Each structure stands twice: as C-alpha cells, then as structure tokens.
C-alpha cells in the first residue's frame, strides 16, 4: 500500500510562496527548488531504519547508528522531478569520500559533520531556541529533579514551559518519550520548534556531557546554565576516557550561557568553570554562597517526606520541599537561584518548590498510614548509598530496600549495590530489574556476593518476580517502616529477554493496596 505524506513545514511553505511569486527570477527559482528538496529529504528520511556500526573516533572506538538495508536510490518522476535531484544529492561530509560513481553531486566538506548537522537543523526549524528563554542543567546527580523544580517554579509564575530530560519531553500537557537525556540535534531542534509553536516561552533541558561532546546542542545559547554536582560517571568505552575529560565537557555549558548558577560547595566547581565566559551566581551551604541554606529540618508523615530550611544571602526566604534529604536542599537552592536570576516573584518560587513532585525520584506512594513506601531510580552504588543515607536520617523503624540490577551491564554495579544495601538496610528484598538477556538467578547470585562482603549477617530474601516482591514488601511491612523500591523509578516497563511489557510500580502498588483493603 502506498503512503502519501504531506510535508507542511513552515520553511517549505515560505520558500514555495517565494517560488510562486511572478517576480522571482530563474536563478532564485532553481536555488529555492534545491533548498526545498533538501528540506523534504529531512522529513521523508526521518523514519529510515538504522543499525549499530562500530567506528573509531579521535577519542576511542564506539558504536554508532547508520542507515540499514539496501542503498537508497533517487528516482525523478517525469521532467518535473529533475529539478529536485540536485538538492537531494547534496552531501555534507567530514572526511574525503569516493565520488567517482556519483557525478555532479554537490559536496560540502566541514570540520565536524555533527556540528554542521546541528547548525543545519537549527536553520531548518527557524532557530526556535533564539525565540525562547533557554535554561540548561548539567551535573552528575540531581539534573532531573532540579529541572522539575525549576519547571514547577516557572509554571507557578505563569510561564509556559517545555522540558526535555531523562523522564522524556513535556510541554503544554503533552508527554513524549526520548531515547537520550539530550536528544540528537535534529530531534532537539524539532522539539524546540514544537515548544514554540505550542506557545512555550521557556525551554528547559538537561544537558548531558554526551550531548555537549557530540554537538547535540551546538548552536544553542542558554540564558541560564545550572551546575548541580560532579562525581565519576560515564567513564569507559564509548563515553569519556577520564574523569577530567568528563568534567571538561560538563564545563562547556558555561561557555555558552549568560548566567551560570553553580553549586559552590562541590569540590569540582572551580576546575569545571575554568575558561567560563558567563556571569556566576552561587548556591550552597558555604558562607560565600549567594543563596545559602540554614536551619534544615527533616519532615515526615505517611504521605510526606521532605525538608524545610531558611535561605539567606542575597535574599531571605523560608522553603519547604516535598522531597527528602540534603540533596533536595541543593536542588531546591538551584531552582530558587534560577527563579531569582529570572526575576520571578517570591510567592511563585515558594509555591513551585512546595508542590513539586518528580516521578521516580523519591516518589511517595501513600497507600498506608502504617508505613511509608517510595520509588526511586537509584541504580548504582553511589546513588543507592546517597538515597539510603538520606532515608536513614528519618529514623525509620526499619529501612527496607527492594532492588535488583539490570542484565547485560557491569557486574561491579551488582556487587556495589549489594554491599551498600547489606551495610545500610535493615532488610533487603532481592528481585529482578530489567534482566534483558540474562537469567535473573545469575544476577541475584552476583548481588549476593556484594551482600556478603558488606555484611555477612545481612537479612534478606530473594523473590525473582518483581511484582511478587512488591506484594511481599507490602504484606510484611511493619509499623513505622520506610520501604524504598529502587532501580526502575519512572520506568513504565519490564524488560525480559529483550521484550518490554508494561510495568508501572506506582499503579501496581496502588492496585494491590486496594485489592487487599489496605488502610
């Protein structure tokens, strides 16, 4: 069955209108036809299948996506199609290629094809980022929570916000999935265009080190850049060779923004900001911070787990956050500082921080007054230790952890999470995560190695099926328990043998509580 696709991109409509003008000369007509053909190829080719291919970059070997299947042929239909062939066959290349079989092809050689693609994508969609307030958030931990807090503050101030990050793309009540925290440049610019067309006046996004290194955000200038914190991550084959390289790429954000809002307490801040070109606004606990937190108080009920504190420095304000722990204080300070930089009212900042909830990030599921249960994305040793340290400060009757580890990933992660949970939890329920193509029994065996190292006397039970594990946690909960279900967080699926099936933990817990009549 044939498919007709109507391409109604505003740039194509604009150029077509000029072509139809009787005052447009022959030369301009042909140039416009070439440009329209190039724009159409972007749209026509967007769903072409790709396959993984290993290449060697100047840094290391890595796996990339390239077009799959048979070579693509371009067939002009009758005489009318001939005028569009030149536009379609223009190539932008980074390295010399053999053109002996492609006579007449226009070739543009550039230093970086990824950088060129980013600039062309921006031009294709009319450079929408230049027409909105741009906010970028980078760091190792806290990017997702911080962006959600900033979004909540902005919306409390009446702003229309489009947001891009780990949890997907959100704008004007819509949600779209994304394969990367920072999408590829074409998808990114297309998303900005969607934001602008939907009426957004602010674009807020997580900016990953990979996004900076791979030129996904090339050509984008930010009004505000935010730095949360830095610790070793994304170091290895296909990512960054060293921690220093990782830090350096994170720091690039502060060479392409007007104001940098940075965590003054992080030991890597000074090195990360080397060569920055932006004005700096700082936050933290330090006396030198422009916005600093004092008098932190932990707050807990069955349906609330948060913190209250007082802000001093350039301004004073009492803040209450519906998220627990020290890291929530820092994330809230970052959001507050962004609000101050943008001149938002104090009332909006206070309201936005107080009501913000992030799916899968210390997300409470209030199904019982007897105990507290929450979901979190912690899926490695560092994030697990940080979370359990935070929760332990609330002095629960028992700290219970439900966790597993993903298949076809480093075993070191399993050993590390097992060791931390054995040391810090009162009771652990070992179960599956996304097993992918590994047997859950093998993954649990690796976790046990870490458990034994952390505490040979640690109390735990193994329940391979994650749904059964959730039911067990609820059935055996004791008065005053704090139960952390970690690893999957915001994810909506379970991956077994490469097959993804729906699995949303919040809904599953709520359904089970209703089924058993939990109060």
Image: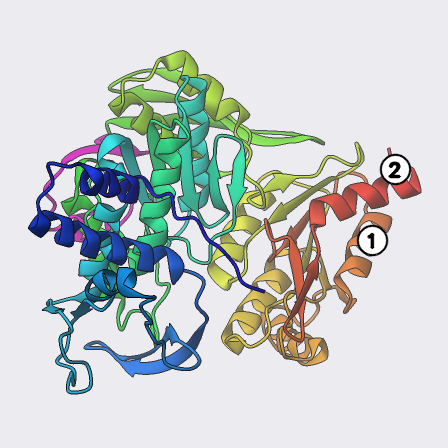
| Numbered label attached to residue 518 | 2
Q: Is residue 271 magenta?
A: yes
User: Is residue 216 toward the left or the right of residue 43 in the image?
Assistant: left
Instruction: Judge left or right: residue 266 versus residue 397.
Output: left
| Residue at image point 73% right, 34% down | 366
Measured in 3D between alpha carbons, the distance from the residue under mark 2 to the one under mark 1, in whole angstroms, is 12 Å
According to the picture, the residue beneath numbered tag 1 turns out to be: 471
Q: Residue furthest front?
A: 79
**Mark positioned earlier in the residue sequence (2 or 1):** 1
Judge left or right: residue 286 versus residue 423: left
Q: Which residues are magenta?
A: 266-288
Front residue of this view, candidates 274 and 192: 192
Q: Splitting the image into 4 quarters, where does residue 183 fall?
A: bottom left
Looking at the picture, tell me which residue is in the foreground, 492 or 13.
Answer: 13
The quarter of the picture where the C terminus appears is top right
- Whether the magenta-drawn stretch holds residue 370 is answered as no
The structure's colour scheme is: rainbow
Q: Is residue 471 above or below residue 500?
A: above
Badge number at residue 24: none
Q: Is residue 50 left or right of residue 340?
A: right
- Which residue does the image show at 55% across and 29% down from the upper left? 322
């Amino acid at each position: 069955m044939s498919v007709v696709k109507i391409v109604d991109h505003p740039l194509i409509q604009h150029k077509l209108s000029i072509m139809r003008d009787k005052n447009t000369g022959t030369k301009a007509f042909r140039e416009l036809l070439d440009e329209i053909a190039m724009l159409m190829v972007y749209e026509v080719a967007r769903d072409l299948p790709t396959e993984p291919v290993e290449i060697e970059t100047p840094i290391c070997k890595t796996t990339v996506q390239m077009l799959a299947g048979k070579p693509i042929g371009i067939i002009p239909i009758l005489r009318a199609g001939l005028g569009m062939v030149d536009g379609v066959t223009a190539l932008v290349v980074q390295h010399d290629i053999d053109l002996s079989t492609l006579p007449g092809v226009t070739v543009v050689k550039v230093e970086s094809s990824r950088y060129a693609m980013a600039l062309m994508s921006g031009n294709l969609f009319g450079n929408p980022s230049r027409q909105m307030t741009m906010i970028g958030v980078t760091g190792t931990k806290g990017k997702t929570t911080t962006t959600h807090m900033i979004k909540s503050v902005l919306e409390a101030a009446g702003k229309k916000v489009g947001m891009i990050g780990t949890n997907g793309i959100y704008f004007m009540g819509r949600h779209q999935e994304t394969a990367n925290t920072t999408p590829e440049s074409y998808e990114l610019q297309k998303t900005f265009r969607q934001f602008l067309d939907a009426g957004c006046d602010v674009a807020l996004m997580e900016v990953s080190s990979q996004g900076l290194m791979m030129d996904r955000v090339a050509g984008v200038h930010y009004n505000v850049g935010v730095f949360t914190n830095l610790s070793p991550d994304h170091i290895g084959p296909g990512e960054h060779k060293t921690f220093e390289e990782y830090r350096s790429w994170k720091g690039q954000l502060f060479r392409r923004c007007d104001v940098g809002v940075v965590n003054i307490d992080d030991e890597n801040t000074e090195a990360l900001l080397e060569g920055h070109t932006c004005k700096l606004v700082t936050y933290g606990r330090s006396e030198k911070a422009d916005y600093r937190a004092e008098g932190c108080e932990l707050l807990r009920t069955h349906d609330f787990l948060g913190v209250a504190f007082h802000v001093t420095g350039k301004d004073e304000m009492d803040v209450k956050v519906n998220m627990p722990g020290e890291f929530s204080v820092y994330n809230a300070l970052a959001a507050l500082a962004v609000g101050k930089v943008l001149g938002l009212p104090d009332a909006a900042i206070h309201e936005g921080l107080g009501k913000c909830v992030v799916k899968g990030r210390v997300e409470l599921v209030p199904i019982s007054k007897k105990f507290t249960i929450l979901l979190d994305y912690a899926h490695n040793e560092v994030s697990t230790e940080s979370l359990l340290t935070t929760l332990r400060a609330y002095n629960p009757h028992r700290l219970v952890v439900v966790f597993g580890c993903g298949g076809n990933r480093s075993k070191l992660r399993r050993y590390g999470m097992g060791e931390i949970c054995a040391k810090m939890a009162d009771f652990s329920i070992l179960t599956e995560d996304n097993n992918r193509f590994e047997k859950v029994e093998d993954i649990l065996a690796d976790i046990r190695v870490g458990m034994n190292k952390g505490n040979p006397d640690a109390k735990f039970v193994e329940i391979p099926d994650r749904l059964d594990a959730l039911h067990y946690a609820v059935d055996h909960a004791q008065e005053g328990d704090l139960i952390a279900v970690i690893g999957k967080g915001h994810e909506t699926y379970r991956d077994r043998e490469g097959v993804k099936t729906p699995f949303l933990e919040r809904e599953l817990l709520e359904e089970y509580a209703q089924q058993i009549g939990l109060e």
